[in-house]
Image (cartoon, helix red, strand yellow):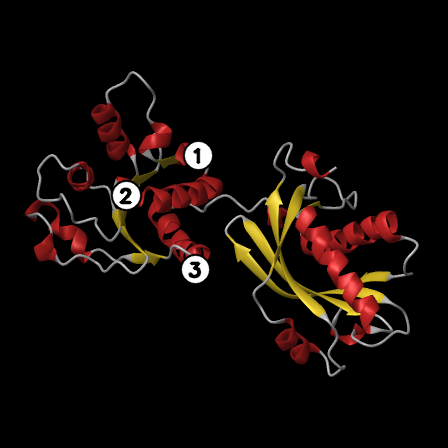
Amino acid sequence: MAAIFLSYRRMDSPQACRIYDWLARRFGEDDVFMDVAAIPVAVSYIDVIRQAIVESRVMLVLIGARWLEGLEAEDDPVRLEVEAALSAKVPLLPVLIGGTPMPDPTQLPASMQSLAFQNAVTVGVSHDFHTHMQALLPMIESILGRLAGPSRVMADPDVIHRACESVIQFLKTAYARDRADELNVVWEVVGPRDFAQTGQVAVTLFLHRVVRLEALLELHFVLSFWGFFAVSDHRLAGWVIHQLERRPLIPLISTGAGEAEFTGELKIRPSHEDPRQIWTLITKEPLRLSLGYIGTINPLLQGALHAYH
């Protein structure tokens, strides 16, 4: 049976599914028990649940806004799960969903009041989800006595550079195919010292932030346009926006580095960060028209790229 048992109310299923997916990518699907994913057909639901709890190493008790409702009933499923874990001496780790407060002992049945004295963690439901899960991970690892599996993405130390070059090569190739007769454009990845007018029409990619999200990586970058006239900047920017909206999945280029090289895709989406603020931090050059994007490096999904070729 699985080492990690997820206890939750049906109304909290969306967050429970996100947590399950996150943990399954880290520890493997066989090590995370979630009833809708792990119970086979034509078997006793209650027997499977009880067996899974007894054989688990830790129970994550997901506590949402209406988690307390129904606990007074002796046959409440969540109450039965927590009581079974306490009886089997399985460690409990309360996970507060969003801004849900930790229940007071007086709000709980006597049989499960000890839950209120466990250290709890909060897991947000929006942009802070991955950050909170990263904080939760060491607690689970400590209870299990082993580390989660290594990130497939970071098994390749060159993956960040490959991702940046992939964006530039993708745009360069597409522009040569679609607009070759328009402008002779230089496409390149640059660093802070490269932010200077080169006397050529250019589109540059500057990577200014890398965020580790469990098994994934987010790359925050700025595309800047270096034309001689406003019209060339405008046309290039419009073409790039159009291109990345039509084809947001970019395959990672290969360097032929062997087994360590990660095979995957880069999913591009616009960033809400203001490129002007990034610009002022990295160069004193006059402001150029720029676009902010985020690229998420994912394991390759079979067939996901075929629709874009």
Image disc number at residue 128 = 3
Instruction: Give the structural element (helix, strand or loop) at label 2.
Output: helix
Select label 3 or label 1 by which is in front: 3
Residue 178 in the figure: left or right of residue 246 = right
Q: Nearer the viewer, residue 259 or 33?
A: 33
Residue 107 lies left or right of residue 135; in this view the side is: left
Residue at x-position 71% and y-position 53%: 242
Quick one: SS at disc 1?
helix
Please tell me how crowded label 3 is: few (under 14), some (14-19), or many (20+) other residues with Cα within 10 Å. few
Which is nearer the N-term, disc 3 or disc 2? 2
Indicate which disc residue 11 carries: 2
Dot 3 amino acid type: Asp
The relative height of residue 124 versus residue 304 in the rendered view (above or below) is below
- Sooner in the amino-acid sequence: mark 3 or mark 1: 1
Is residue 247 visible in the rendered structure shown here? no
* Separation (CA) of disc 3 from disc 1: 23 Å
Residue tagged 1:
29
Q: Is residue 175 left or right of residue 308?
A: right
